[in-house]
Image (cartoon, rainbow, N blue to C red):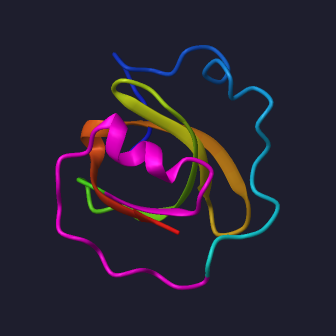
Amino acid sequence: MAFGPPFGPPPGRPPGSQQVPPPTSPPPTFIPMQPAPFRIDPGAISGCLFRFTYLWLVDGDQFWFFPVFVGARSVAGFRWTGRSWRYTGFDLRLILSFTCF
């Protein structure tokens, strides 16, 4: 689930991410084991900036993500569609768990 009212997204990309292009290659071809759910906060997910990251959302959706911005309550970056990278963002409360490589 991407940003939606009332969180969402400001016009364009977050400050500092305007110049960040999507990854030049697809993500890994495997789906990693899901870690135990834990509280997602900016400090935890900021260690995954500019790294292939697998997200599990509270609605059951899961996918490869390449974060380029972490805010106080959100993360933005590129989501793998299966064919290409698409820029998007998420409220941190929507993320159940994640792992990055």
Question: Where 101 sits versus 15, above or below?
Answer: below
Question: In percent of the image, x 68 and y 23: which residue is there?
Answer: 16
Judged left or right of residue 19, residue 73 is left
Judged left or right of residue 52, residue 21 is right
The quarter of the image holding the N terminus is top left
Q: Is residue 39 magenta?
A: yes
Question: Where 37 sits versus 42, above or below?
Answer: below
Question: In percent of the image, x 72 and y 67: which residue is there?
Answer: 83
Mostly what secondary structure, the magenta segment?
loop
User: Residue 86 placed where, x, y %?
Assistant: 67, 48
Q: Is residue 13 magenta?
A: no
Count of numbered tags: 0
Judged left or right of residue 40, residue 30 is right
Residue at the outermost bottom position: 30
User: Residue 13 placed where, x, y %?
Assistant: 65, 24
Task: Choose between 40 and 1: the one closer to the eye.
Answer: 40
Judged left or right of residue 6, residue 8 is right
Question: Where 79 sits versus 33, above or below?
Answer: above
User: Residue 94 placed where, x, y %?
Assistant: 28, 43
User: Residue 90 placed where, x, y %?
Assistant: 42, 38
Q: Quadrant of residue 7?
A: top left
Q: For the magenta stretch, what is the residue range? A: 29-56
Question: Where 5 sits versus 40, above or below?
Answer: above
Question: In percent of the image, x 78 and y 68: which residue is there?
Answer: 25
Task: Choose between 31 and 45: the one closer to the eye.
Answer: 45
